[in-house]
Image (cartoon, rainbow, N blue to C red):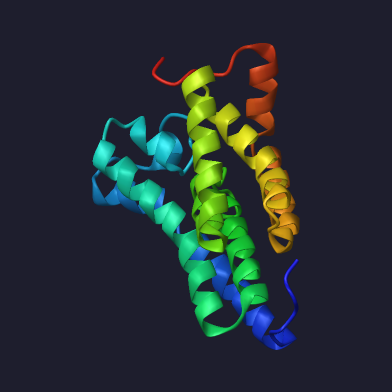
Amino acid sequence: MPDLLTSFPLLIGVAIAGYLLGSIPFGIVMARLFGLGDLRQIGSGNIGATNVLRTGNKVAAFLTLIGDAGKGGAAVLLARALFAEDAAQLAGFTAFLGHCFPVFLGFKGGKGVATWLGTMLALAFPLGLAACATWLVTALVFRISSLAALVAAALSPVIALAFGWNSLVLISVALAALIFYRHSANIARIIAGEEPRIGRK
């Protein structure tokens, strides 16, 4: 973990601000802006870009993806610019928590993959790129989006350690653990061979 340079009261403020930013449900917002209805009543009921895509509106899905990734990245970059790296990591972590457990939606949020990738890209751009590349390669080989996310999340702490980004190992482990927790139902379907594949209904 990084050196603790930011005062405790400021870190509390950063944590709250990061959480509130992460709680903005861009999927819900885009679904309403594009007249797609209540996203929680569509498809899987998830608030992320994948479920927005199930409506058939690719623009809304793309904007949701950018928004969800952007709020994680923005939380990190703003905290880093205003304070220090300890605040940046905390902001990224709480933004991820906000997406998964948003106060605006009764703490019922998304699975956090886009927000996680945005956070990783902002924390260390090469590490974020490695996570994106891992997701892409796994998705191309196995055609299972959730599996790609799980593999990328599991390998991110290993990549951080291998390339000497020791201060990022702890947060990488914590985020990966939450990714696995949020995908528990997907993991059960993968084991049972019932997880939907990309491009198949």
Vertical comparison of 171 with 82: above or below: above
Spot occupied by residue 179 in the image (x, y as percentages of width and height): 65, 43
- On-image quarter of the C terminus: top left
**Residue closer to the observer: 151 or 35:** 151
Locate residue 184 relative to residue 98 in the image: left or right. right
* Residue 143 appears in the figure: no
Percent x, y for residue 152? 60, 38
x then y, percent, for residue 178: 69, 47
- Residue 42: horizontal and vertical position, in percent? 41, 33
Against 145, residue 71 (above or below) is below
Which residue is found at the position 35% from the left and 34% from the top? 53
Quarter of the image containing the N terminus?
Answer: bottom right
Is residue 10 positioned above or below 24 on the image?
Answer: below
Residue in the picture at 57% in, 51% down:
127
- Tally of numbered discs: 0
Residue displayed at 56% across by 43% down: 131
Asked which quadrant contains residue 94, the reply is: bottom right
Which residue occupies the extreme front position in the image?
163
Of residues 141 and 181, the one nearer the viewer is 141
Using the image as rendered, state which of residue 134 and residue 67 is in the foreground: 134
Q: Is residue 72 visible?
A: yes
